Amino acid sequence: MRFIFLPLLLAAAGADAGAATPLNIVTEHAPPASMQGPDGVTGRETDKVREMMARTATSYKIELFPWKRAYLMAQNQAHTCVYSTSRTPEREKLFKWIGPTDEAEWVLWGRADHEFPLKTLEDARKLRIGTYIGDARDEYLRSRGFNVEPVSNDLANPQKVLLKRIDLWAVGMRTGSPGPSQQEWADKVVPLLVFNRIKVYLACNPSVPDELVDKLNAALAEMRRDGSLARLERKYEH
């Protein structure tokens, strides 16, 4: 009888081992959501992810990479998740989704002294729009036939706006936040039009077990109910 049940025992052990595989969680440097601290990756969205992992006793590690690399890692590598990822129809089937962890607006910024009308996104059809390589805003605008000029460093875009090398900059902003601001271009490059509102998630490779995805979503829902989510957000308010 021992030998009859041995294959079943081995199969069960293999399933347990697979379920216990640590998650490789990746993100980009995007303060205050995610950034490198003295004791590892920290930030508002990072704290939410760490709390979810703690509540579900999930083994994990978090690493920072350029956004495009982090996004492709989650898309192509088993047991890998990336945050904060905009959930769009184009991406829906690429990942398993945990969240939303936050909400954001997509905003077109331009020179404060711009001379073109901009009341709807369609008004930007013939304008040059600066985007960030691998970003959801770049995908969204490109797929709709807009004239996008992606860069590897998003903060190159406001300088390009000031130099009139592009007309607009597509910016992702947390709902209710003032958005990016730097001393050298403050009040010179300003928000002009909100063109989309989205929610952001921890997006996981399809290899991540459904059971774990369900547990993490349940933990996030509990955090929302018991006030932990709001507490973590207040920690980074200035």
Image (cartoon, helix red, strand yellow):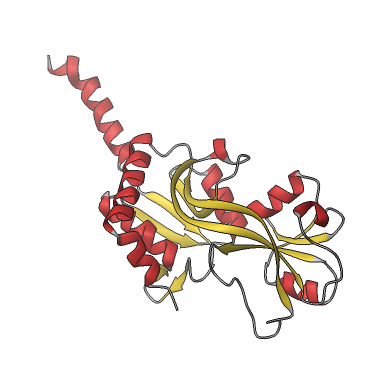
Question: Residue shown at 31%/55% (left/top)?
Answer: 223
Question: Disc count in the image?
Answer: 0
Left or right of 120, for residue 33: left
Q: Measuring from the top left, give residue 117's x and y in whole percent.
A: 83, 63
Question: Residue shown at 31%/38% (left/top)?
Answer: 19
Left or right of 231, for residue 142: right
Q: Measuring from the top left, give residue 238's x and y in whole percent.
A: 45, 79
Direction bottom: furthest residue: 183
In the displayed structure, 226 sits above or below 43; it is: above
Q: Nearer the viewer, residue 72 or 180?
A: 180
In the displayed structure, 123 sits above or below 160; it is: above
Rendering quarter of residue 182: bottom right
In the displayed structure, 220 sits above or below 119; it is: above
Q: Measuring from the top left, give residue 42's x and y in whole percent.
A: 41, 68
Q: Quadrant of the N terminus?
A: top left
Rendering quarter of residue 115: bottom right
Is residue 115 among the parts visible in the rendering? Answer: yes
Q: Measuring from the top left, give residue 6's x and y in whole percent.
A: 20, 21
Is residue 135 among the parts visible in the rendering? Answer: no
Question: Residue shown at 83%/53% (left/top)?
Answer: 125
Q: Nearer the viewer, residue 203 or 171?
A: 171
Q: Nearer the viewer, residue 121 or 16?
A: 121
Left or right of 231, for residue 6: left
Direction left: furthest residue: 1
Rendering quarter of residue 12: top left
Question: Residue shown at 37%/63% (left/top)?
Answer: 47
